[in-house]
Amino acid sequence: MIVQRVVLNSRPGKNGHPVAENFRVEEVNLPDCVNEGQVQVRTLYLSVDPYMRCRMNEDTGSDYITPWQLSQVVDGGGVGIIEESKHTNFTKGDFVTSFYWPWQTKVILDGNILEKVDPQLVDGHLSYFLGAIGMPGLTSLIGVQEKGHITAGSNQTMVVSGAAGACGSLAGQIGHLLGCSRVVGICGTPEKCLFLTSELGFDAAINYKEENVAEQLHKLCPAGVDVYFDNVGGDISDTVISQMNQNSHIILCGQISQYNKDVPYPPPLPPAIEAIQKERNITRERFLVLNYKDKFEFGILQLSRWFKEGKLKVELASILDQYHSSSAFQSMMTGGNIGKQIVCISGDTSL
């Protein structure tokens, strides 16, 4: 059987920006035999995420993610349907997901890397298992719960950078649900600002490309910032930190502005900002959601409940086949998407 896959064709370099030519679509033969413990799956949806930029380098700079290899199939979050199973946990027709899904139309996998998913949790929208009811949702929920120190009724203000992205768009909503009295998002277009305030319930939004972020934060957060969900790092984060309150908290989710630079993770703060952080006792601890696997099951159920109750709104940006996977990745890295970026391989294009 001939299948299509996406491989890493070249590396952009540690300080380079990804381009379409870094990826290549090719055809390969799928083995005829499914061995014991394996399953054959058809890919429905693939996820593109900021951390993948690090995997394009020879060294990811991290101890928990491995680099993609040249001329080898790339992988990430995926959802698919089992077509043949020789694993005791799965049968034909089961829907499954994994963090290590090859970008391939059909693939034979070790069943132990797969998790069965229940379509009823997402009202049949299987792609949501790669977004709000999946890893981005868990990252946002657990990050806010574990590192945000939100206390309902204490009149806390939360700021979210990268607020129209996969995690940011969820984190702001979760901040409200857990008790923040005010949530302000930072993003890069007027359309995104309007989306945050009119659709997701953010109290205000700042367009960092057209507005003075420091001035707008003073205006929109008159009591200062108590919780900062940081997706971007760099100058925007420095500006937010400078307006954070005593004993406030940074949720260090991502640093997308730094991923095309050869710097350690998390990137060090400029000396003046580091001094503010220490003087005001602002927590800024590395957050890795994979350290909280014991909370995943409850987290998925909580996210599903909020979604079904209409309290958590989901936004997806779709690109429809593997031939455009690299375009989806570039779009996500440059802020072209609102919400979670998904590549639809053979699922329902309505997501």
Image (tube, rainbow, N blue to C red):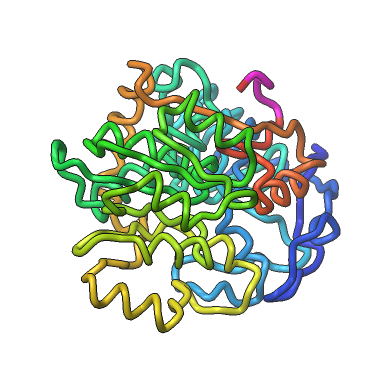
301 vs 154, nearest the viewer: 154
Q: Position of residue 97 (x, y in %)?
A: 50, 38
Q: Quadrant of the C terminus?
A: top right
Q: How many marks?
A: 0
Where is residue 261 drawn, in percent x and y?
63, 74
Query: Magenta stretch: residue 347 in it?
Result: yes
Quarter of the image with the N terminus is top right
The relative height of residue 40 versus residue 251 in the rendered view (above or below) is above
Residue shown at 65% from the left, 76% from the top: 58
Q: Which residues are magenta?
A: 346-350
Whether residue 303 sits left or right of residue 164 in the image: it is left
Q: Position of residue 273 (x, y in %)?
A: 39, 75
- 109 in the magenta segment: no
Q: Is residue 119 above or below residue 281?
A: above
Which image quarter: residue 300? Answer: top left
Q: Which SS does the magenta portion mostly show?
A: loop
Q: Nearer the viewer, residue 108 or 330?
A: 330
Q: Quadrant of residue 78?
A: top right
The answer to whether residue 252 of the structure is visible from this angle is: yes
Please indicate, yes or no, whether residue 98 appears anywhere in the rendered image: no
**In the image, residue 17 lies at what x, y percent?**
74, 65
Q: Residue at x 72, y 45 (%)?
A: 31
